[in-house]
Image (cartoon, helix red, strand yellow):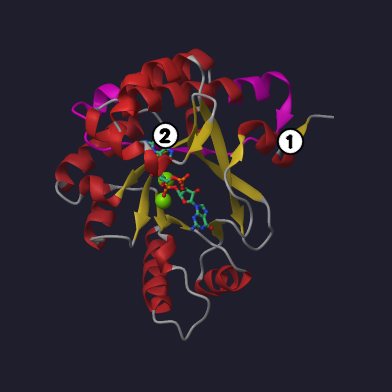
Amino acid sequence: AQEIETHFIDALKNNEFKLYLQPKIDIETGKLIGAEALSRWYYKNEKLLPPMEYIPRLESTGLIVELDLHMFEALCKNIRLSYDSKFVGHVPVSINLSRNQKDFEGYINKLESIRQKYDIPPNLIEIEITESTFTENVAEIKKLINYIHKFGYRVAMDDFGSGYSNLSALVECGFDIIKLDKSLCADNASDKRSYILEAVINMCNKIGMKVICEGVETKEQAANLLRLGCRSAQGYLYDKPLPVNEFVNKYMEEEK
Ligand code: C2E
Ligand code: MG
Ligand code: MG
């Protein structure tokens, strides 16, 4: 664990962190509607570390901010490159906002200057905030979301249903999108989790909040979501997170 910190700065310089994108899919049409940016660490270019092995550690030491800015720059670079090489079919990409930051607004300002540097349309950027970041302080999250909205980015609540989900906070805070946690994914109507899914999806549809389900692994789960009124999904049924080049090759086209 100590090694993670001492090697981290060199790892950034050596480009050991790789940008991966996982597609978000319209269940009905099978078409690409978005992507989530996730990182992978090729530690000393020897072994692949999954996020769970370094994100919590980087979060507790505050180094996560450096990683996230580095990954955001990589993302913007790639989007700019795909515009310049005349690719079409750009979709919004979401990034994960880490908790335990002292200055969220300062962080958003840094994202904004990177976005401007690469001239990326702000409506292509979504910021995912996980439930546990804000259960403690609704007023603060509300303020943060307002701040983020000023720049034209959309905000998603990540992993809804994995913890102490608070519906009123969800509505009050001004999230644009809600991401249902994979633990809510149910195969059919007789699964009790379907009642929760149905209630949340109905509410979102009524108040005009977009809803997407994560961790969709089976056709049954996708069909059940569609039946309940949720058209969007992310999960292994469609694709795992892919290295950015593979993602572009598979999901985007060059203009003819
Ligand atoms: P998350 O934001 O909830 O991302 C979704 C996670 O679910 C990803 O795990 C993804 O690989 C996984 N997943 C996708 N489809 C399926 C599926 O069908 N079944 C199952 N069982 N899992 C699926 P991953 O990539 O291991 O990332 C874990 C968490 O680490 C992410 O959860 C995110 O919160 C965080 N994370 C990853 N990369 C970064 C990063 O660069 N910066 C920050 N701040 N957080 C990151
Ligand atoms: Mg996420
Ligand atoms: Mg999630």
Q: Please indicate, yes or no, whether residue 146 appears anywhere in the rendered image.
A: no
Q: Residue at x 69, y 59 (%)?
A: 29
Mark 1 falls on what kind of element?
Answer: helix
> Where the C terminus falls, by quadrant?
top right
Q: Please indicate, yes or no, whether residue 36 appears anywhere in the rendered image.
A: yes
- Mark 2: give few (<14), some (14-19) or many (20+) Cα within 10 Å: many
Q: Give residue 91's position: percent from left, percent from top.
A: 59, 39
Q: Which residues are magenta?
A: 79-108
Looking at the image, residue 79 lies above or below residue 178: above
Instruction: Report the number of numbered marks.
Output: 2
Q: Are marks 1 and 2 in contact (CB under 8 Å)?
A: no
Q: Residue at x 41, y 59 (%)?
A: 180
- Mark 1: give few (<14), some (14-19) or many (20+) Cα within 10 Å: few
Earlier-in-chain disc, 1 versus 2: 2
Q: According to the image, label 2 marks what residue?
A: 153
Of 159 and 12, nearer the camera is 12
Mark 2 falls on what kind of element?
Answer: loop
Q: Give residue 189's position: percent from left, percent from top.
A: 49, 83
Q: Residue at x 66, y 23 (%)?
A: 83
Please indicate whether residue 104 sits to the left or right of residue 11 in the image: left
Residue 249 tag number? 1
Residue 77 falls in image quadrant: top right
> Where the N terminus falls, by quadrant?
top left
Q: Alpha carbon of mark 1 to alpha carbon of mark 2: how far?
A: 26 Å
Looking at the image, residue 130 lies above or below residue 90: below
The kind of residue tagged 1 is Asn
Queried whether the magenta region covers residue 144, the answer comes back as no
